Image (cartoon, rainbow, N blue to C red):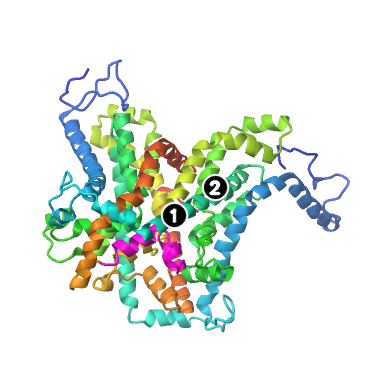
């Protein structure tokens, strides 16, 4: 029962000596439940009021579309809208798997997303470890501010800047690497640039890594130093284990979106020449779904995407549990 | 205070100082190397972030031909304001700017009005349904309807091609709710609530009169997160808006900056490219400036806020 009550006593407890617990509880329980619910609302109506808008929004904009997933199994009928239409089972899934583009799309998606995952995981950790080594708090703050800045720049701007710098002849990087043809047209370049960018954008996460590092007990450092650890060993043996739980959780979470390769960046960097290497599930879904109005087909692919992500998430979680005892579920 | 010792092992005498970040001690040659590497890498990272920004700034003031030829490296060359003049004369940019400001401000206001009260309610331990609610919220972080169901839903709700498509669907970010909830759980002492109860305050009274005034840090952080999300949002406009008049700045930028790229082979495209070149840097600056200016001021809130999110445990 609630320990802090603004009003009167809670409902009558089940262990009332007047009522034998076995037989009579069957008939006396029902009024109890309604009474309890009414009492609950009388006490907590304000909290319900405060959270109501959020609950409504989540119900409408997160759960209704989930219900609309069944579109993946139905033939879309414009007259019947979201849930009408005939049931066709796995028809659209099969269509996707047998489509000539399937191999290409899947390969691209997996390749780009693995790159992104690796970069987005390693960079922030290294950065956090480095920043943590700075002695002066002023310099530390400065570096933190600076490295967090890309977070504020829009994808459009970042991709434009990338194009500018990679232009053969005039772009800084372009000249440095002596590129002859436009970088954008080379197929293989996309994954690496995309992942580098996401590595820098992922600089939101170092702060949480840093927080974990800042919380490390200084006596651990003491003990390690007494055992003769040099600076590098200190990092290896104290900092890294301290970061691992946070980083691990972040890794699991990103595994859950392993196939959600950022639509924004990819879409902005695509052009007709690099398409075979850059078409991924998210961009393909957009093109055939919104631009071509193949609603059912697109929903089916989206559902496939979600399911695979989920499988990855559960797997990563299980592995992490086995290895380090940190997990989300 | 210290001289380099031959071996890394510190003295075991009584004046041993624990490793802490504000004092150097007993540095070895190995430590020096480590320091150089560490600071070197950090400098590299800082330059990698700052130089592109600096370049865009100076290029926006420079003669576009010199920029294209690659003459501009550290300082502007051939200072000219032609680029900016063109940017300011472009009506599409202004309209996009206005749209973005409206969507971002209204959007963030709605965001905060919806997220913060809910986070408060969920932070009350005596509120039994909170577990279920949080679970339902968290599920939405992993399972989503997908693009098409969302699109059809917005269509039915009349959100397509309307300003509200920027504001309503994204009103609740579950992640932000969780961060705000952690804040309320850890930073508002329970004694305040007990004292308020003695004074006869209800939950609503407590929330508005005591909790909110104390929450400026989390309001700033979450507000900023949401605001930046709105400002830089590019996909929503692209997918759900068909009227050019209603497009936010980012989509206008995309149309101006990125549509011509990689295939400048014929004369027409080259001329377009030239025109785009002149305004490109100016546009980048003009669109990013507001956030860049706000950020340093709110920066201290930010670092604190991200740490709060990390404590969620």
* Res A232 seen here: yes
- Residue A180 lies, with reference to residue B39, above or below; the image says below
Q: Which residues are magenta?
A: B233-260
Q: Is residue A129 above or below residue A264?
A: above
Q: Residues within 10 Å of mark 2 (few under 14, many from 20)?
A: many
Which of the 4 quarters of the picture holds residue A147? Answer: top left
Q: Is residue B239 magenta?
A: yes
Which quarter of the figure is the N terminus of chain B placed in?
top left
Q: Which mark is residue B98?
A: 1
Check disc 2 and report the residue beneath it. B112
Mark 2 belongs to chain: B
Q: Position of residue A176 (x, y in %)?
A: 12, 54
Viewer-side residue, B113 vs A90: B113
For the residues beneath circles 2 and 1, the answer to whether they share a chain is yes
Residue A39, horizontal then vertical, whole percent: 78, 48
Badge nearest the viewer, 2 or 1: 1
| Image quadrant in which you'd find residue B210 | top right
The tag earlier along the polypeptide, 2 or 1, is 1
**In the image: residue A168, left or right of residue A77:** left
Q: Quick one: which residue is furthest to the right in this view? A: A18
* Rendered view: A209 above or below A177: above
Helix, strand or loop: magenta stretch: helix
* Number of numbered tags placed on the structure image: 2
* Label 2 element class: helix
Q: State the residue in front, B270 or B146.
A: B270
In what element is the residue under mark 1? Answer: helix
Q: Could you tell me if the residues under marks 2 and 1 are in contact, i.e. CB atoms within 8 Å?
A: no
The percent position of residue A294, horizontal first and vertical second, equals 45, 79
């Amino acid at each position: 029962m609630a320990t802090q009550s603004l009003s009167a006593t809670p409902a009558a407890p089940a262990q009332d000596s007047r009522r034998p617990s076995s037989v009579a509880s069957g008939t006396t329980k029902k009024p109890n439940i309604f009474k309890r619910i009414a009492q609950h609302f009388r006490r907590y109506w304000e909290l319900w009021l405060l959270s109501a808008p959020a609950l409504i929004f989540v119900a409408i904009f997160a759960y209704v579309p989930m219900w609309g997933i069944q579109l993946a199994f139905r033939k879309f009928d414009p007259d019947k809208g979201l849930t009408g239409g005939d049931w066709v089972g796995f028809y659209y899934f099969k269509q996707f798997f047998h489509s000539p583009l399937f191999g290409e799309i899947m390969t691209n998606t997996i390749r780009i997303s693995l790159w992104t995952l690796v970069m987005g995981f390693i960079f922030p950790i290294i950065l956090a470890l480095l920043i943590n080594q700075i002695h002066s708090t002023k310099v530390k703050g400065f570096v933190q501010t600076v490295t967090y800045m890309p977070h504020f720049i829009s994808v459009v701007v970042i991709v434009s800047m990338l194009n500018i710098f990679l232009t053969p002849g005039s772009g800084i990087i372009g000249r440095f690497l002596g590129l002859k043809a436009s970088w954008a047209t080379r197929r293989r370049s996309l994954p690496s640039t995309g992942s580098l960018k996401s590595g820098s954008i992922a600089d939101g996460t170092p702060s949480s890594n840093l927080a974990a590092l800042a919380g490390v007990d200084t006596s651990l450092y003491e003990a390690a130093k007494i055992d003769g650890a040099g600076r590098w060993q200190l990092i290896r043996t104290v900092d890294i284990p301290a970061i691992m739980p946070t980083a691990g959780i972040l890794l699991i979470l990103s595994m859950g979106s392993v196939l959600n390769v950022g639509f924004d960046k990819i879409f902005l960097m695509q052009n007709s020449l690099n398409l075979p290497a850059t078409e991924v599930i998210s961009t393909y879904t957009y093109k055939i779904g919104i631009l071509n109005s193949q609603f059912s087909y697109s929903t089916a692919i989206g559902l496939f995407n979600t399911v695979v992500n989920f499988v990855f998430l559960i797997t990563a979680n299980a592995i992490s549990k086995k290895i380090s005892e940190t997990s989300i579920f | 205070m210290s001289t380099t010792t031959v071996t890394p092992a510190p003295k075991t005498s009584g004046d041993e100082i624990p490793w802490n970040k504000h004092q150097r001690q007993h540095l070895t040659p190995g430590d020096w190397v480590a320091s150089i590497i560490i600071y070197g890498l950090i400098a590299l990272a800082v330059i990698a972030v700052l130089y592109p920004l600096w370049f865009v700034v100076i290029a926006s003031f420079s003669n576009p031909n010199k920029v294209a030829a690659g003459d501009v490296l550290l300082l502007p060359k051939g200072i000219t304001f032609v680029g900016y003049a063109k940017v300011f004369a472009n009506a599409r940019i202004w309209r996009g700017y206005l749209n973005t400001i409206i969507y971002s401000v209204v959007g963030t206001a709605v965001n905060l009005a919806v997220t913060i009260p809910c986070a408060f309610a969920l932070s009350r331990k005596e509120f039994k349904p909170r577990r279920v609610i949080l679970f339902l919220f968290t599920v939405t972080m992993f399972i989503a309807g997908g693009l098409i169901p969302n699109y059809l839903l917005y269509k039915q709700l009349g959100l397509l091609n309307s300003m509200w498509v920027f504001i309503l669907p994204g009103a609740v970010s579950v992640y932000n709710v969780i961060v705000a909830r952690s804040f309320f759980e850890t930073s508002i002492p329970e004694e305040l609530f007990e004292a308020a109860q003695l004074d006869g305050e209800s939950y609503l009274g407590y929330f508005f009169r005591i909790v909110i005034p104390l929450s400026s840090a989390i309001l700033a952080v979450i507000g900023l997160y949401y605001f930046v999300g709105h400002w830089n949002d590019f996909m929503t406009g692209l997918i759900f808006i068909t009227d050019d008049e209603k497009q936010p700045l980012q989509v206008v930028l995309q149309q101006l900056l990125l549509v011509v790229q990689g295939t400048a082979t014929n004369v027409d495209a080259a001329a377009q490219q030239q025109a785009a070149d002149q305004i490109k840097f100016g546009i980048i600056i003009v669109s990013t400036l507001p956030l860049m200016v706000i950020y340093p001021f709110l920066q201290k809130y930010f670092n604190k806020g991200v740490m709060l999110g990390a404590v969620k445990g």
